[in-house]
Amino acid sequence: MTLKMMAAIVAAALPLAAAAQSSVAVYGQVDAAIAHEDADSPGVASRTAIHAGQASSRIGFRGTEDLGGGMKALFNVEAGFGIDTGMGDSALFGRRAVVGLEGNFGMVTIGREYTPIDNISGATHILGQGFYGTNLNAFANGRMTRRISNSVNYKSKPMAGLKFSAAIGLGETPTGPSQDLKTVSVEYQQGKLFAGIGYASYDRLASGSDREMIFGAAYAIGALEFKGNYMVGDQTGPNNRYTQANLGAAMAFGPGKLFGNLQQSKLQNGARGNGYAVSYAYSLSKRTNVYASYGTTVNNERAAFSLSAAGSTITPPASALGADPVAYAVGLRHTF
């Protein structure tokens, strides 16, 4: 082989080598359910609606570039939209919008990111933060924080099954309370066992900091899974401490999977709501499944806790204490 031929081969291969060093992917999922929802409240009619039932519809773009020395640059932007109207969320890339670096030191990202508490919440909830009865109602009512804007985030590499995460969301306020959110978590993963604990402090008011906490665990035995978590949202002020506990199980039957979850939400003033949920999903392929979902929240005489699915939250009016929201749906989800 002559030197001229070798040079030509190397020159032709350079673009392919460069392409191999970086990648960009488009991904997402589309979820549509026909649902019937009843807030069980005077003056509030039940409704039949179309929205996401198992997981929020979204489209995202993510990519990496190899920088050498075991380090790479990365980005991820993700937009949510409603399958019923095609309209996007209030923010274009409100689900996630980050850029960062990853290497032997771990991963650092800057932008709008999921909180460490939400990561544990999703990993230890049997409904996967979808279906009726999901723990998303804890985030929808403002007691817990799911995403943080203006954030700097760090995730360590796993060491003997342990992983550490920390983040700060800058409030960017020139006067008054900083509005900063600071949060940390520790996760442990060993085989089919997962456990995590997280804490957050939110400087929302000058009189004190709101606090958020979570502990969760998950374990699988063959086709059977168990997941549970306990969350606390302790906002500044009297009788504001909110707690939610979830305990669920799932069993796979061939291409089908049955889910069940028990949930209890409580406020310091004695308000209590017990949630009951059951869902079934059947896989038509690796990327497409059909499902049915049912959930209800049974509130005591002091409570009006909500019932959530991926694309909807049913909240009785504050005056409708003791109302028991209920909903069921059938739907289809496709991922790409």
Image: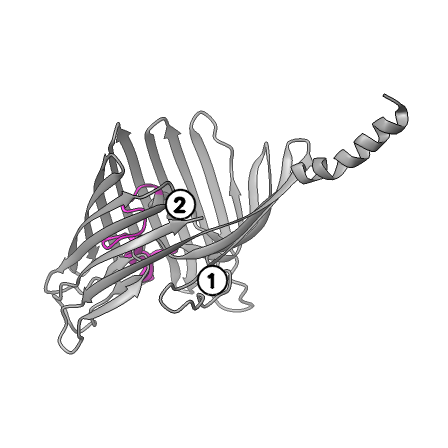
Which amino acid type is shown beneath numbered disc 2?
Asn
Furthest-top residue in view? 1
The part of the image, by quadrant, that contains residue 49 is: bottom left
Q: Find residue 297 and report its horizontal and vertical position in percent.
A: 16, 58
The image shows residue 192, relative to residue 168, as above or below, that is above
Q: Residue at x 28, y 32 (%)?
A: 219
Label for residue 119? 2
Label for residue 39? none
Pick the front one: 67 or 279:
279
Q: Residue at x 43, y 30 (%)?
A: 162
In the rendered image, the quadrant that contains the N terminus is top right
What residue does disc 1 label? Answer: 179
Disc 2/disc 1 C-alpha distance (Å): 22 Å
Pick the front one: 164 or 122:
122
* Dot 1: element: loop
Which amino acid type is shown beneath numbered disc 1?
Gln
Specify the principal SS of the magenta part: loop
Q: Residue at x 53, y 69 (%)?
A: 175
The part of the image, by quadrant, that contains residue 313 is: bottom left
Whether label 2 touches label 1, CB < 8 Å:
no
* Dot 2: element: helix
Q: Is residue 318 visible?
A: yes
Q: Is residue 143 visible?
A: no
Residue 126 lies in the magenta stretch: yes
- Local packing at callout 1 (Cα closer than 10 Å; few below 14, some 14-19, many 20+) is some
Q: Nearer the viewer, mark 2 or mark 1?
A: 2
Q: Find residue 151 and report its horizontal and vertical position in percent.
A: 53, 54
Mark nearer the N terminus (2 vs 1)? 2
Which region of the structure is painted magenta?
Answer: 123-145
The image shows residue 106, relative to residue 168, as above or below, that is above
Pick the front one: 231 or 49:
49
